[in-house]
Amino acid sequence: MFTHLRAPARAAEVGAGSARATTGQGGRKLQGARSRALSPLSGYASIAMNLEAGLGGMVPPLLRDRVFRRYWGASTVSMFGDQISSVALPLTAVLVLHAGAASMGYLTALQWLPSLLFALHAGAWVDRRGKRRMAMILADLGRAAALATIPLCYALHVLTLAQMYAVTFIAGALSVLFTVSDGTLFVSIVPPDSYVDGQSLIYGSRAFSFMGGPSVGGLLVEALTAPFAVVADALSFLGSAVQLAAIKPAEPPSSDGEDGVTAGLRFVARSPIIRASLTGVAVINFFNMMFSALFMLYAVRMLHVRPGVLGVVIGAGAVGGMIASLTAKRLGNRLGIGLVYVVGCFVFTLPLALVPLAASVHGVAVLLMLFAAEFTSGFGVMVLDISIGAIFAMVIPDTMRSRVSGAFQAINYGTRPAGALLGGALGASAGLRPALWVAVAGGVAGALLLLPSPLPGFRLPTGLPADDAGELEDAESV
């Protein structure tokens, strides 16, 4: 639209200049008439050009790059589809297959079990093979195919819980392959001085998906039934694969593979930054899974919050996360990215104390406390995720990135099923509110583990080229 407006304006200037050059007094009169006749068009052209310049200034610099825009688009559509499935898959098990509490526990455990079983080997395989983008595309296509079997078998009246377990496990395993490849592709696309910007955009999309995905998933379940709503997630994986297939960034070379599967674990053990982060966040996630296993049951049965209202309360966390994605870079520049990460861990865990405290108040105060807990905790988890993503992008060598990601994921995600099982057992034996207090205290203890580490004093190096071999040494020595 803007091109069409600018072209006549330039033509008008040329025409007027020609009249001035070839005519006398009559030419000047003609020039004035033309100027008056075309002045509205020139005004619109000026407005259009100014509007385009203003919009260009509003678009983040990374999104003006076609390659990153495709990569970001692939992540965004996939995350939105995941949030739809976070509603559709459990409801398929509950409403269609009449799954009980034990069956739902197995379904949740199977989602995280592949991280414990395969992350180390997947990271080593990807680093040795290279071609991370192709591995991500294959993972997307495989997840799309696996999820598509659910509505297909439902339509044929042959859907079973066993198939749900198999699809969940297969999709989880392919997600491990995607995740261990993603970090290397990110640093292949994003320059080092834009790591925080890139992480903010990715996690901003994640927060947006948390806001809209479950609501869309609920509407699709009501309109199409739960199994057919899963189609949206399958299509999102196809959309992600198409976006990734459209880019071909230069990837780091593959490793020789001589240092074996455990190289990622050894790197984590040697790096004070990554070792401290893994220790703290594994403890936090263990107790957070305890908390998550009990939260909805506690809110509905003890606090008597209606499901619809509870959905709005949970959405507050996504709003906090969206705000965090817009402010994380400014906080990192001012305070240092390591300190922001540590503070984010406390902001994530401490406000959850408002949830068990809410049992001591009544009426609107209950909802206000739950809303404050979710909003503040959502802000904290997004800040810590963005910060640690930028830190890891800087301190992990490209040829080790997938193996380190696999080792980190195996331990970090591997604690989650155990945390959920312990939360259920403790809630049944000691009561929901005491179990929530244990979960909150344990999460804060995990954040405290970070204080004596090098993380609070860590700052991202500035002014270094992307291939500067010294940047890793400088970063890790802080």
Image (cartoon, rainbow, N blue to C red):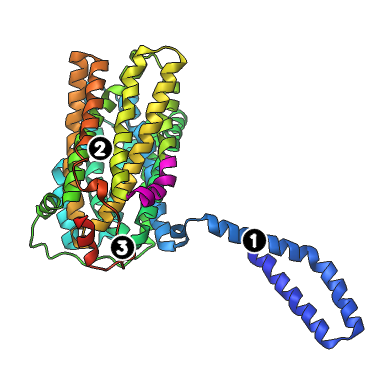
In reply to whether residue 330 is colored magenta, the answer given is: yes
Q: Do the residues labelled 3 and 2 touch (CB within 8 Å)?
A: no
SS at mark 2 in the image = helix
Between the residue at mark 1 and the residue at mark 2, the CA separation in whole angstroms equals 51 Å
Between the residue at mark 3 and the residue at mark 2, the CA separation in whole angstroms equals 30 Å
Q: In this view, does 198 lie above or below 379?
A: below
**Which residue carries the number 2 mark?**
168
Mark 1, Cα crowd under 10 Å, few <14 / some 14-19 / many 20+, is few
At label 1, the amino acid type is Asn
Q: Nearer the viewer, residue 356 or 290?
A: 356
Image position, residue 205 (x, y; %): 41, 45
Image quadrant for the C terminus? bottom left
The image quadrant that residue 417 belongs to is: top left
SS at mark 1 in the image = helix
Residue placed at 20% from the left, 48% from the top? Answer: 454
**Which residue carries the number 1 mark?**
50
Image position, residue 208 (x, y; %): 44, 41
Q: Is residue 231 left or right of residue 267?
A: right
The mark found on residue 188 in the picture is 3
Q: How many marks?
A: 3
Earlier sequence position, callout 3 versus callout 2: 2
Q: What stretch is highlighted in magenta?
A: 322-336
At label 2, the amino acid type is Thr
Mark 3, Cα crowd under 10 Å, few <14 / some 14-19 / many 20+, is some
Q: In this view, does 98 lie above or below 242?
A: above
The image quadrant that residue 220 belongs to is: top left
Image position, residue 382 (x, y; %): 35, 41
At label 3, the amino acid type is Ser
Q: In this view, does 6 lie to the left or right of 12?
A: left
